[in-house]
Amino acid sequence: MNMIIYVLLTVFICALMIGRTPEFLGKKIESAQMKLIALVILIHPLLILVLSALAVVFAKDSISNPSFHDLAQILYEFSSSAANNGSGLEGLKDDNLFWNLSTAFAMFCGRYLVLIAQLAIAGSLLAKNTQENTANSLKTDNLTFMFVLVCIIYIFAALTFFPVLTLSSVAEYLSLWH
């Protein structure tokens, strides 16, 4: 996912918190852009989590190690596919029709759905008139904005993947102590 999406989200949140109209580079951010930004942010986690849930249900014959580690393997397989990385955690029997089609679907949607939505955001912002920045405009070139941006990225990542990570990698780590 592109960093500019998180920057636009942070601008929107910060501007609403200080009571200003959200704008970035002289362009107002309105509900149409925010809907597309929300779509871009949700595509990647939904692909990973929904396809992982389907794999747990329908690809039971591919599971070589029925434990916490297997869920981590499945999550990594789809995380890597949705990010167009293509690597995998070994041990998963993923050379069959289900895995080939599901990871291809994750690659296609992870790349092109996000790209189409980002181009729609760029096109809608391009069509808007540029406004002059005033003294009351939100400043995006300071440490405060950077801190809020990093916090928003971490909060979104934690809320998205922490529950399933506790069922896989964290649970596997904790099971080593018993």
Image: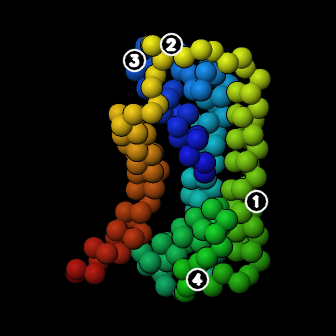
In percent of width and height, residue 34 lies at: 61, 29
Q: Quadrant of the C terminus?
A: bottom left
Residue 103 in sight from this viewpoint = yes
8 w.r.t. 56: above or below: above
* Res. 33 image quadrant: top right
Which color scheme did the rendering employ for the protein?
rainbow
Which comes before the other along the chain, label 1 or label 2? 1
Q: Eyeballing the image, is 49 above or below 19?
A: below
Q: CA distance from mark 4 to mark 1?
A: 21 Å
For residue 76, side relative to residue 96 (left or right) = left
Q: CA distance from mark 4 to mark 2?
A: 56 Å
| Residue plotted at (70% across, 27% down) | 125
Q: Which residue is mark 4?
A: 92
Question: Few, some or many C-alpha atoms within 10 Å of disc 1 (few <14, some 14-19, many ≥20)?
Answer: some
Q: Which residue is mark 1?
A: 108
The residue that mark 3 highlights is 18
**Above or below: residue 178 compared with residue 79:** below
Front in this rendered view, residue 153 or 131: 131
Earlier-in-chain disc, 3 versus 2 = 3
Q: Secondary structure at mark 1?
A: helix
- Examine the rendering and report whether any part of residue 52 can be seen: no
- The first of marks 3 and 1 along the sequence is 3
Discs 4, 2 touching: Cβ within 8 Å:
no
- Kind of residue at disc 2: Thr
In percent of the image, x 63 and y 56: which residue is there?
Answer: 47
For the residues labelled 3 and 2, the Cα–Cα distance comes to 15 Å
Instruction: Decide which of tag 4 and tag 3 comes sooner along the chain.
Output: 3
Q: Which residue is mark 2?
A: 134
Q: Is residue 169 left or right of residue 78?
A: left
Q: Secondary structure at mark 4?
A: loop
